[in-house]
């Protein structure tokens, strides 16, 4: 009795420590979000072009355009995130803060949905809270969470859809079941029209519904497909075919298997403490219970999105959906272990693994074969389940503490974080004084991992405004690889480099008119960062322009090129 | 199958995995057999896909004995 009380107290202390650790990461995340929301320029490559899409939608125009004519701009992303942000353009003009705020709020909603799903499935409040916080503590979710990018909104819609659909087949009331089915499928459509990668969640939901009741899956699948295809055909018609060309044809990129493998390794290294229990729950459901939508979603997201992380334009963000699924499954596993709720119905595996001598009496002294210590699990006896629950009281909080150690990321500068980093001997391994466990101590990281996560400084903001000043000095149009500078200067964004490169890789880009204008030195200034333009454009720039200045902002060198004399 | 009460069993799921994984395995091998003039043999992406297909087929095989339990 005293031992149990001690275990319970220890469990509470360890759980409180785990909650405290993950709350610390939430505080780091909030600081990072506030820092980025107040930053007026591109932080992650491509944010500015998502702002351009938002501005175009606010003006009632499509961003899917012919890239062979001035201003040579097009987008490859579906519209929903930008449509949601468009009213902010009417109210506040072009700015990054509202897109970043929307993304940040999306992550909070996703975390709440994860916590709700775990609590609904297990009734364990603290594990539910830990599961939601674990999502926000992930290095991947942290660094893409508060960006003006549509990815994390897609993850929010996906998570909400899966949580809505999880128990839908068991709802006896027909009207309520139909309402939730419609809501779940509408959320999947919303995810798909936020980013194409949500196709994996549509697949998972379809497989889940088909396994549970094929007739219902076929009927509702046809209705959802009709709605999705209808929107698709309308958009393609309204954009003169550019939607298909820009967002679909140009968006299928080659796979670099080494990048995929490196990112898989990194994903497991960071999230392994939660991946293992999640995978164990998937195996349990596969062999001893019914497959849940969470298990199917996890397998699809890990397998398909994980593989796609190695494509050009992919990266660790492609694991965000899998991380959400991991948090839900590991949470349910943890709660079930703490409550001693594992049941192993009789089948060939339970007989093989749990009771290796099925035809013998419980204690087969004659054959000398001991029963498995797990036998009572399948026979409803409380002893072993209780023992496992006792072990779980220690192991489960340690899993979350281990996870908290594995995802360590924090600024190493400033009054609070600097003191803490000094006390814990945590050296910076990223720019602007930041430590990220996804990197080695000397700052190396897996190919495809986004080189962000650090805080920006006043010097970065000043550097950005100095580039804006150069643009304002020019009387001719200006090309900038980050759209934020031209937008802040009140100029039109010209070109979308990565999209031009996407098109070129698929043999869909000519570039004749843009090259002619560059050769004719019709641009007063060209600002390059990663030089993600097609070769034909970079060659033209090299012919007609020369680098006159370098401005460092946010750790990156911006090359300012002016016409050659 | 299209009745209101039908649900897939572990055996159904096992057969789908077994045939799906097996067909995928053969298709990946077939790419090299049909495209005989290509140099380089089975690349790293194909190796991963082959291993995954074989794994899916084996999981399917292990599900079949579970019979009519709902999947």
Image: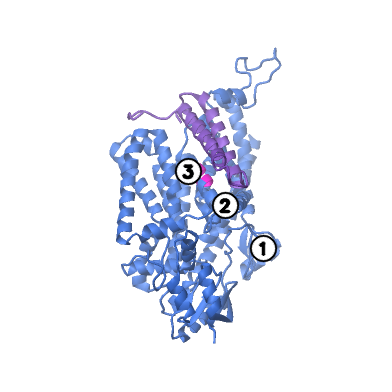
Residue at 50% across / 83% down in the picture?
Answer: A470
Q: Which chain is blue?
A: A
What stretch of residues is rendered in magenta?
Answer: A297-303
Q: Earlier in the sequence, mark 1 or mark 3?
A: 3
Q: Nearer the viewer, mark 2 or mark 1?
A: 1
Image height of A343 relative to A296, above or below: above
**The image quarter in which residue A344 lies:** top right
Q: Which residue is mark 2?
A: A19
Residue at 43% across / 43% down in the picture?
Answer: A203
Between the C-alphas of marks 2 and 1, the distance is 28 Å
Q: Earlier in the sequence, mark 2 or mark 1?
A: 2
Image position of A61 (left or right of A390): left
A444 vs A516, nearest the viewer: A516
Image height of A488 relative to A5, above or below: below
**Element class at badge 2:** helix
- The percent coordinates of residue A377 (x first, y second) are 57, 27
- The percent coordinates of residue A287 (x first, y second) are 53, 30
Q: Which residue is mark 3?
A: A297
Q: Which chain is purple?
A: B
Q: Which residue is mark 1?
A: A443
**Is residue B59 rendered magenta in the image?**
no
């Amino acid at each position: 009795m005293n031992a149990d009380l001690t275990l319970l107290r220890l469990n509470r202390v360890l759980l409180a420590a785990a909650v405290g650790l993950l709350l610390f990461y939430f505080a780091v995340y909030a600081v990072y979000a506030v820092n980025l929301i107040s930053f007026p320029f591109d932080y992650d490559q491509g944010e500015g072009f998502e702002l351009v899409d938002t501005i175009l939608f606010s003006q009632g125009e499509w961003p899917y355009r012919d890239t062979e004519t001035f201003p040579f701009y097009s987008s490859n992303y579906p519209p929903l995130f930008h449509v949601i942000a468009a009213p902010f353009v009417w109210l506040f003009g072009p700015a990054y803060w509202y897109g970043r705020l929307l993304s940040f709020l999306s992550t909070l909603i996703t975390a709440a949905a994860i916590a709700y799903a775990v609590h609904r499935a297990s009734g364990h409040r603290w594990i539910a809270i830990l599961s939601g916080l674990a999502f926000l503590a992930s290095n991947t979710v942290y660094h893409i969470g508060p960006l003006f990018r549509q990815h994390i909104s897609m993850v929010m819609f996906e998570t909400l859809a899966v949580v809505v659909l999880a128990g839908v087949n068991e709802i006896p009331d027909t009207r309520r079941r139909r309402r939730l089915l419609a809501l779940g499928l509408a959320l999947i459509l919303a995810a798909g029209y936020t980013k194409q990668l949500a196709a994996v969640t549509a697949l998972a939901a379809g497989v889940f519904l088909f396994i549970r009741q094929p007739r219902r899956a076929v009927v509702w699948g046809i209705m959802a497909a009709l709605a999705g295809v209808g929107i698709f055909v309308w958009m393609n018609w309204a954009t003169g075919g550019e939607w298909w060309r820009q967002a679909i044809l140009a968006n299928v990129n080659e796979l670099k298997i080494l990048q995929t493998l490196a990112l898989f390794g990194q994903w497991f290294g960071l999230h392994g403490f939660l991946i293992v229990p999640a995978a164990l729950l998937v195996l349990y459901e596969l062999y001893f219970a019914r497959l849940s939508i969470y298990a199917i979603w996890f397998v699809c997201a890990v397998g398909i999105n994980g593989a796609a992380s190695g494509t050009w334009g992919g990266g660790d963000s492609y694991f965000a959906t899998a991380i959400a699924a991991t948090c839900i499954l590991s949470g349910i596993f943890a709660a079930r272990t703490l409550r001693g709720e594992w049941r192993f119905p009789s089948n060939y595996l339970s007989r093989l693994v749990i009771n290796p001598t099925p035809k013998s009496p419980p204690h087969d002294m004659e054959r000398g074969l001991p029963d498995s210590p797990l036998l009572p699990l399948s026979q409803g006896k409380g002893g072993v389940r209780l023992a496992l629950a006792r072990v779980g009281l220690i192991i489960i909080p340690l899993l979350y503490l281990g996870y908290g150690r594995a995802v360590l990321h924090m600024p190493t500068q400033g009054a609070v974080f600097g003191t803490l980093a000094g006390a814990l001997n945590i050296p910076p391994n990223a720019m602007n004084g930041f430590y990220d466990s996804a990197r080695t101590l000397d700052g190396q990281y897996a190919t495809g991992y986004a080189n962000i996560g650090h805080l920006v400084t006043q010097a970065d903001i000043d550097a950005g405004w100095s580039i804006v000043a150069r643009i304002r000095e020019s009387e001719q149009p200006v090309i900038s690889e980050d759209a934020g500078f031209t937008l802040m200067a009140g100029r039109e964004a010209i070109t979308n480099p990565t999209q031009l490169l996407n098109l070129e890789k698929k043999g869909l880009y000519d570039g004749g008119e843009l090259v002619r204008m560059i050769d004719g030195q019709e641009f007063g200034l060209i600002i390059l960062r990663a030089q993600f333009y097609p070769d034909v454009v970079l060659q033209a720039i090299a012919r007609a322009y020369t680098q006159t200045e370098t401005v460092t902002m946010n750790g990156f060198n911006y090359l300012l090129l002016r016409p050659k004399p | 199958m299209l009745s209101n009460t039908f649900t897939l069993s572990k055996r159904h799921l096992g057969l789908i995995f077994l045939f799906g994984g097996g067909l995928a395995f053969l298709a990946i091998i077939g790419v090299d057999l049909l495209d005989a003039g290509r140099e380089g043999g089975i690349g790293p992406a194909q190796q991963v896909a082959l291993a995954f297909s074989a794994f899916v087929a084996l999981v399917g095989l292990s599900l079949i004995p579970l019979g009519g339990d709902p999947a």
